[in-house]
Image: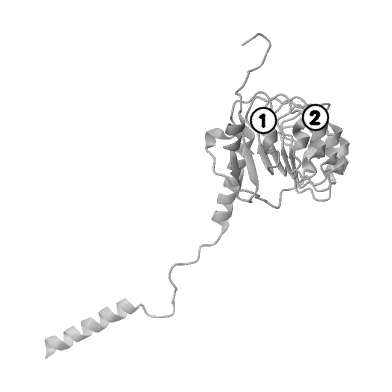
Amino acid sequence: MPKGKGPQGKRITLKVAKNSVRVAFNGRRRLDLSKMGIATFPKCILELADVEELDLSRNFLRKIPNIIEKFQNLMWLDLHSNQLDELPAEIGTLKNLTYLNLCNNKLTTESLPEELTHLKNLRTLNLGLNCLETVPTTFGKLRELIELGLFDNSLTLIPKSVKKLPKLERLNVKRNPLPEFEKEEEPIDTVKRIESLYLVEKKDLCGSCLETCQGERDELHKLEEMTPVPPNKPSFSSLTTPNSTAMDNQEEWRIRDDDS
């Protein structure tokens, strides 16, 4: 490998891409190119730009080209665990996007394009495990946002415009150098929403995803322990046990037989 250059990455052909299209549980078509060793955005997938979901997570991507604007049907975009240090302004043209995962990259506050605020239908935005020092106050324009992940950054302040988002139910700011009063104002996650269910092996999850799964599993176990278990058999405490009564009757008949 030449000095100073990153991994060359695997070359994805159109045939490979077509074979990677799956139908998700929600009926959408997903192009899943995760864990493929990709270092450069494969232009051949423009032939599949009508998919509703695109998964490019766990690769070596450093840039997303402006041709991402061709994917106008996208509702779900997963780019977590790459090496992204910038995003194109054209990402703001994906008007149907409801889910955007940018976790575990190298994004800074300066590398977040203002056009992100054009994603008016966005409900989930994950920016955890990046290099953010501040949160753009313009994120307050994302009025449909339900879940916002900002964990494992370098944040010292969460703008009021973000904390006051009308539909925000979950704001994860864990492991940031925030003052205590900022942490106390973190909204409590009272509603759990699952859009799709996928079975994956533990080794395939990134650290933050594994932590989330384990936390939700522990909560489920707590709920199970709190749920009262109905008795298997009805209890008739005021009645005589049938078997003991039968035994007494048998003894009485046995005595009568002996006397006769």
Looking at numbered disc 2 in the image, what kind of residue is underneath it?
A: Pro
**Taking 6 as reference, is 236 above or below it?**
below
Q: Left of 13 or right of it: where is 178?
A: right
In which quadrant is the C terminus drawn? bottom left
Describe the element under mark 2 as helix, strand or loop.
Answer: loop
Disc 1 crowd, CA 10 A, few/some/many (<14, 14-19, 20+):
some
Residue 86 placed where, x, y %? 77, 26
> x, y (%) of residue 150?
75, 36
List the single residue furthest toward the top: 3
What is the x, y in percent for residue 199?
Answer: 54, 43
- The tag earlier along the polypeptide, 2 or 1, is 1
> Mark on residue 44?
1
Q: How is the image coloured?
A: one colour
Q: Indicate the amino acid at tag 1.
A: Cys
- Evaluate whether residue 244 shows in this view: yes
Q: Nearer the viewer, residue 187 or 123?
A: 123
Asked whether the residues under the numbered discs 2 and 1 touch, taking CB atoms below 8 Å apart as contact, a structural biologist would say no
Mark whose residue sits in front, 2 or 1: 1
Q: Total marks drawn?
A: 2
Residue positioned 64% across, 42% down in the render: 30
- CA separation, marks 2 and 1? 19 Å
